[in-house]
Image (cartoon, grey):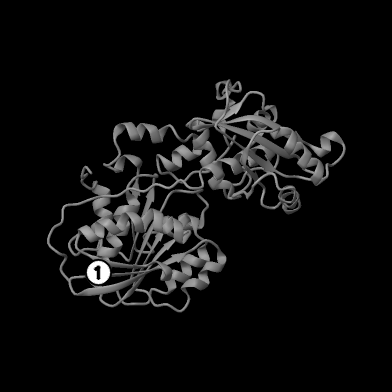
Amino acid sequence: MEIKPFSEKQLKSLFWWAEGSGYEHHDAIICDGAVRSGKTFSLSLSFVMWGMFCFHRASFGFCGKTIGALRRNVIVPLLPCLKELGFRVEDAVSKNRLTVSCGGHENLFYLFSGKDEGSASLVQGITLSGVLFDEVALMPRSFVEQALARCSVQGSRFFFNCNPEYPSHWFYREWIKRRREKNALYVHFRMKDNPSLSPKMLERYETLYTGAFYKRFVEGEWVSVSGAVYPFMDDSRMYVPVPDGGFDGFCVSCDYGTVNPTSLGLWGRKGEVWYRIAEDYYDARREGKSKTDEEHYESLENLTGDRPVEAVIVDPSAASFIEVIERHGRYAVVRADNNVLDGIRKTSRALMQKEVVICDNCVDAIREFSLYRWDEDKPSDTVIKRDDHAMDDIRYFVSYIKRADSSFCCAIVERQNEPEG
């Protein structure tokens, strides 16, 4: 693997706590900005190095949205580098705990999930000497403040990293805007600050986003979303005829409604691309009557014909319809991931990269793409709950096919003398 030197901002976040850095008087560091900018790796390495240099027999906290995401994004890339640098690491996976030793020092690093308001109870009772929050903007304020309150040891510090969200977000208002009174060092990253990204990769990432998401994830700005959710879908070239020939596999996605429309999308895979090749869209208000669950199931069978369907991905709240599908025993049901914002981001990337393509016979999906809007009257990222039924079933499908996707970056550095303890 080619070794890339750290950028100036990565070095700043790596050694800010060290005597003589000029920043060692700060109590916290905030690294925000673009995705793939190298802030996560340099900050997590900094966190462990600081803890091992300054403490012995102390406890620290790694916090992520979920334990799985924390391990994937932080721990897995970090461990090989720590071992290469001479640190000894024991990973007690079942206990969500790392035991790190080096130079006569040994410390415990606990892993915590900050996924919802109830997560605050997970950190109650523990005493920490420092805490790192990976993607802090995705965590509830109650969890973050509870974890900060556990850092009662003299000399404890806070490490934050995140990608930007909307400007009224609590973390932006309470920490970034008030960083001076919080005595926090602020390091803002852009994608170009990651020296491991080639010009070709930079160009690729810059084409993945449009509008506010481009400003957030490429330029690293805290901006509000507005207008169309998928503005690039106004281009008629985004819609294609159903491809000729056979398909390698099939799936169905479903957003279920009784009074609201029910949208079914039939997807066919050809090579690495999934095409929405047909749909069934039933609007009870427009038709003047509602369908029963059995009638919706009949529509599902009519849509799929005799095709071998891998899975039917269904709105998780549609319990009665799921029960009917499972009772008939023909289709495997998958309850959809209903994380709206994460699903919209995945769908946007999948559409722009042509991993998912909408065929021009899917008229209701095309109609909704032109109408689907952000709610500009809300302070947070919220879509208007109207003309969103095909949009929801498409989002369910993309989240399903991207469910196993994971990526991480890793750095290898030449081993120097063992850090002093």
Report the residue at 71% width, 48% height from top.
Answer: 329
In the rendered image, the vertical position of residue 341 relative to residue 181, given as above or below: above
Image-based side of 81 in relation to 341, left or right: left
The picture places residue 276, in percent across and down from the top left corner, at 61, 31
Q: Residue at x 29, y 49 (%)?
A: 410
Is 123 drawn above or below residue 385 in the view shown?
below
The residue lying toward the viewer, choosing from 69 and 247, is 247
Q: Is residue 405 left or right of residue 417?
A: right
Q: Is residue 24 visible?
A: yes
- The spot of residue 19 in percent (x, y) is 19, 65
Q: Position of residue 4 (x, y in %)?
A: 22, 44
Q: Tell me the quarter of the picture where residue 153 sits.
A: bottom left
Q: Residue furthest left?
A: 417
In the rendered image, which quarter contains the N terminus? top left
Helix, strand or loop under label 1:
helix
Amino acid carrying label 1: it is Met
Q: Which residue is mark 1?
A: 52
The image quarter containing residue 296 is top right
**Quadrant for the C terminus in the image:** bottom left
Residue 387 visible in image: no
Q: Residue furthest right?
A: 288
